[in-house]
């Protein structure tokens, strides 16, 4: 096999953002639309990437240079932002699955000659990378999964998660990996940092309403902002993390029962704590309040905060009014399906 198409879903954090970075559990759901990667094995020892959604086209470098931003090569002075995750994923796949001797040897007669191998990746996304749906993590998972199939190194889902998480950590420095878990396993997950716990929840339904604030948030900046606050008020912030962890466990039970009234109340409580951590924004607040006033059971920001998306749950007969209310305050309602399938081979 020379070429494969793999897709993985995006994610939305339901409960527990920020506290999850400090060991408390969170709840995340996999959302469609999907990120898609066409990955091709070539024999020219080059890495090639086209990722039009993040403005990368015709990016090329030798496989031996993966992960290096050597200014002296004519092939690229540094790794463009949009190429980082895929490039480091390819590097990590090869360095974990093949010895350096295997990587250096050419023409050993095996069916897959790693020393000659080149990789051509083309990614495309059904959702905008602006939404904060985790497109970088989804692309990472797609590429690791595709390479495991193409090279005959079959990886379990947990192996795909571990390698993808390593890749994200290498680039971001600090991350819980919840988005990697959603892209890999799909569905709705109860998750603890690094994949210490990844538990699939059996949900009756999850009719989420999603509103995009129009502002792209930077996760690393927001995580650092919260860290600064925690350094100044360690006990206060630690207690907030504990309370968030506690409500995540209650939300898990309510979600499984389909008790949306309780889920909504817990969303509002979680939002209060996120506001206290300083990661909400005027725009998110106005969308959240508009949703509640229009009859939602509850609403909160989703993800790092500062921008990106908010989510709401509403009774069937209030869904249209809630969407309208979000639009009326300048939010953009994004149609998604929650609780969808994880990484899969599409062809
Ligand atoms: C960002 O979407 C969610 C955070 O909890 C960071 C993480 O879990 O890696 C803020």
Image: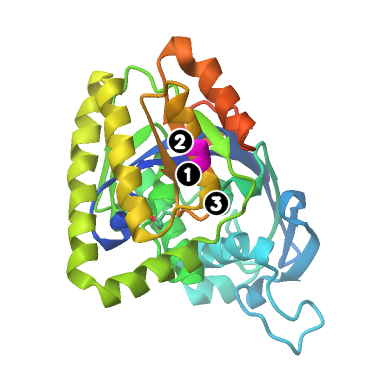
* Residue at x 63%, y 30% (from the top left corner): 328
Residue 319 lies in the magenta-colored region: no
Q: Are marks 1 and 3 in contact (CB under 8 Å)?
A: no
Tell me the residue that label 3 is attached to: 307
Q: Check residue 288 for magenta coloring.
A: yes
The label on residue 285 is 1
Q: Dot 3: within a 10 Å radius of its alpha carbon, few (fewer than 14), some, or many (20 or more) residues? A: many
Q: As rendered, which of 83 and 22 lies closer to the eye?
A: 22
Question: Can the viewer see residue 48 in this picture?
Answer: yes
Which percent across, then down, holds residue 191? 29, 46
**Residues under numbered marks 3 and 2 in contact, where contact means CB atoms less than 8 Å apart:** no
- Quarter for ligand 1? bottom left
Label ID, residue 289: 2
Using the image as rendered, state which of residue 186 and residue 37 is in the foreground: 186
Residue 89 in the image: x percent, y percent?
54, 61
277 with respect to 71 (left or right): left
Q: Residue 230 appears at what percent x and percent y?
A: 28, 71
Question: In the figure, residue 265 lies in which quadrant?
Answer: top left
**Dot 1: within a 10 Å radius of its alpha carbon, few (fewer than 14), some, or many (20 or more) residues?**
some
Return the residue nearer the eye: 110 or 315. 315
In this rendered view, identify the residue nearer to me: 52 or 104.
52
How many marks overall? 3
Q: Cα distance, mark 3 to mark 2? A: 15 Å
| Mark pair 1, 3: CA separation | 10 Å
């Amino acid at each position: 096999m020379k070429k494969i198409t793999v897709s993985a879903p995006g994610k939305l954090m339901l409960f527990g953002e920020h506290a999850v970075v400090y060991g408390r559990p969170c709840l995340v759901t996999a959302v469609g639309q999907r990120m898609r990667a066409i990955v091709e094995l070539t024999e020219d020892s080059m890495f090639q990437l086209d990722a039009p959604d993040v403005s990368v086209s015709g990016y090329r470098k030798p496989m031996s240079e993966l992960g290096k931003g050597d200014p002296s090569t004519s092939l690229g002075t540094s790794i463009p932002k949009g190429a980082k995750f895929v490039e480091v994923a390819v590097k990590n796949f090869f360095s974990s699955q093949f010895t350096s001797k295997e990587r250096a040897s050419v023409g050993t007669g095996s069916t897959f000659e790693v020393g000659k191998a080149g990789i051509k990746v083309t990614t495309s996304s059904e959702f905008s990378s602006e939404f904060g749906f985790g497109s970088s993590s989804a692309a990472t998972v797609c590429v690791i999964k595709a390479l495991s199939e193409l090279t005959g190194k079959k990886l379990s889902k947990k192996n795909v998660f571990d390698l993808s998480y390593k890749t994200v950590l290498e680039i971001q420095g600090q991350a819980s990996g919840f988005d990697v878990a959603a892209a890999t396993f799909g569905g709705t997950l109860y998750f603890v940092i690094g994949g210490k716990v990844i538990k699939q929840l059996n949900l009756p339904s999850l009719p989420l309403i999603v509103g995009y604030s129009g502002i792209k948030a930077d996760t690393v900046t927001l995580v650092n902002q919260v860290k600064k606050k925690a350094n100044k008020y360690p006990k206060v912030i630690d207690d907030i993390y504990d309370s968030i962890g506690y409500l995540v466990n209650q939300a898990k039970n309510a979600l499984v029962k389909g008790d949306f009234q309780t889920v909504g109340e817990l969303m509002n409580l979680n939002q209060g704590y996120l506001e206290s951590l300083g990661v909400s924004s005027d725009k998110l607040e106005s969308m959240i309040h508009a949703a509640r006033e229009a009859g939602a059971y509850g609403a909160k920001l989703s993800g790092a905060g500062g921008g990106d998306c908010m989510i709401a749950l509403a009774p069937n007969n209030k869904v249209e009014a809630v969407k309208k209310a979000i639009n009326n305050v300048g939010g953009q309602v994004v149609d998604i399906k929650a609780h969808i399938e994880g990484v899969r081979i599409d062809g």
